[in-house]
Image (cartoon, rainbow, N blue to C red):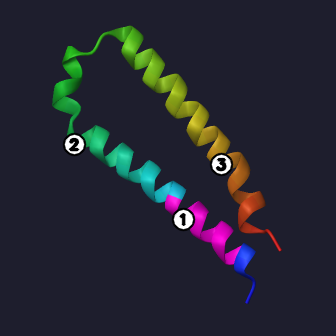
Amino acid sequence: MNHLRNASRFGVILFWSVVIGLIHSAFNNIDNSKSLGWPTWLFYGSVGGAIIYGGAAVTPKLWNIK
């Protein structure tokens, strides 16, 4: 058994599970979004985009670790 490979794959699955859970939570609370201003949406979008881009860039490297 390769424990490093299993741990990295578990981390990838955990990361994407958290991201999907946060997206699901955001869509469930979409009715409350009317109280947020455009700077808040811009901030959330830029942080979310950076996290998803970073995750998409690092996931193949961590998944194929040996």
Q: Is residue 47 above or below residue 56?
A: above
Q: Mark 3 and mark 2 in contact (Cβ < 8 Å)?
A: no
State left or right for residue 52 relative to residue 19: right
State left or right for residue 32 relative to residue 47: left
* Quadrant in which the N terminus appears: bottom right
Q: Which residue is mark 3?
A: 56
Q: Which residue is mark 1?
A: 13
Q: Which residues are magenta?
A: 5-14
State left or right for residue 66 relative to residue 58: right
First in sequence: mark 1 vs mark 3: 1
First in sequence: mark 2 vs mark 3: 2
Q: Which mark is residue 28?
A: 2
Q: Residue furthest front?
A: 3
Return the residue nearer the eye: 14 or 30: 14
Neighbours of disc 1 within 10 Å: few (<14), some (14-19), many (20+): some
Q: Main secondary structure of the magenta part?
A: helix
The amino acid at mark 2 is Asn
